[in-house]
């Protein structure tokens, strides 16, 4: 039997056993990584956003070092590319794309939406990001706001800290996290105090 003919589960088990035997990884490390992967979801990123909205010190940490900010909330980041966080505001709006493939901060946002991996999204985000956001997500970025497209790569991952919506004064972290969608943390949508109903095929809720 060649490597191409081997059952994938058997092959994975054999590679894992070899790595453990050579001391490259340990069984507890493997189990911890599996647990971390299973726990990954946009809810993790939403927790980070909500805390940044109510805690100025945490916001500062998040913008300075996204990896440390994630770890401060118990999110496992060991062995992963650094995480950068970009803040959206009244003067600048950030949009994240991976121009080569689908590099994505899975530890804090879970698995990437299907559209994020598409060639159409990657191309249009670079060619005409305003038209892309308006036509696919009904997100209109005023001409007075600078739209900055950032490239998420294998060496460095990006996430957006969206602007806190009006009408959420006095909300606690749990309430705030509930209105943060994965699209808000990529930059294709913006948070709303009353989330809209499920819409087009480009919907980014999770």
Image (cartoon, rainbow, N blue to C red):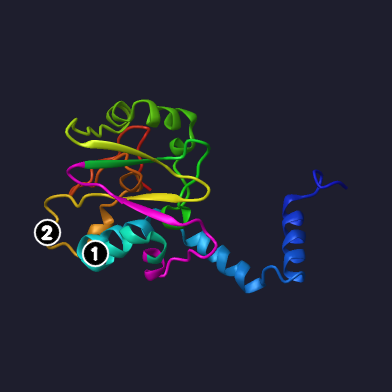
Q: Residue at 44%, 38% (x, y): give it.
A: 116
Residue that label 1 marks: 173
Name the residue nearer the viewer: 200 or 100: 100
Q: Above or below — where is 151 with respect to 47?
A: above
- Residue 40 visible somewhere in the drawing: yes
Q: How many marks?
A: 2
| Above or below, comparing residue 76 to residue 163 in the picture | below
Q: Residue furthest right?
A: 1
Figure check: 25 above or below 101: below
Residue 84 within the magenta-colored segment of the rendering? yes
- The residue under the point 28% across, 66% down is 58
Q: Quadrant of the rendered structure where residue 12 is?
A: bottom right
Who's the residue at 11% across and 59% down the image?
A: 169
> Quick one: label 2, few (<14), some, or many (20+) residues within 10 Å?
few
In the image, residue 149 lies at what x, y percent? Answer: 35, 38
Between 205 and 159, the residue placed more toward the observer is 159
Which residue matches tag 2? 169
Residue at position x 25%, y 43% in the image? 190
Using the rendered image of the protein, determine whether residue 55 is visible from the camera's viewpoint. Answer: no
Q: Which residues are magenta?
A: 69-91
Per the model, the C-alpha gap separating discs 1 and 2 is 11 Å
């Amino acid at each position: 039997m060649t490597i191409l003919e081997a059952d994938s589960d058997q092959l994975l088990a054999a590679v894992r056993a070899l790595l453990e035997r050579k001391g490259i990884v340990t069984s507890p490390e493997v189990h911890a990584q599996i647990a971390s992967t299973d726990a990954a979801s946009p809810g993790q990123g939403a927790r980070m956003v909500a805390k940044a909205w109510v805690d100025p010190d945490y916001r500062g940490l998040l913008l300075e070092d996204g990896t440390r900010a994630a770890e401060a909330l118990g999110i496992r980041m060991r062995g992963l590319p650094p995480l950068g966080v970009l803040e959206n505001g009244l003067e600048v709006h950030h949009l994240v794309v991976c121009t080569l493939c689908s590099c994505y901060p899975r530890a804090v946002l879970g698995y990437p939406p299907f559209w994020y991996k598409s060639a159409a999204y990657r191309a249009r985000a670079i060619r005409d990001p305003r038209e892309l956001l308006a036509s696919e997500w009904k997100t209109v970025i005023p001409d007075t706001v600078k739209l900055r497209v950032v490239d998420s790569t294998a060496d460095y991952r990006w996430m957006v800290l969206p602007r806190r919506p009006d009408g959420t004064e006095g909300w606690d972290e749990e309430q705030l996290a509930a209105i943060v969608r994965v699209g808000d943390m990529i930059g294709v949508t913006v948070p709303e105090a009353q989330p809209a109903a499920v819409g087009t095929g480009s919907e980014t809720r999770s």
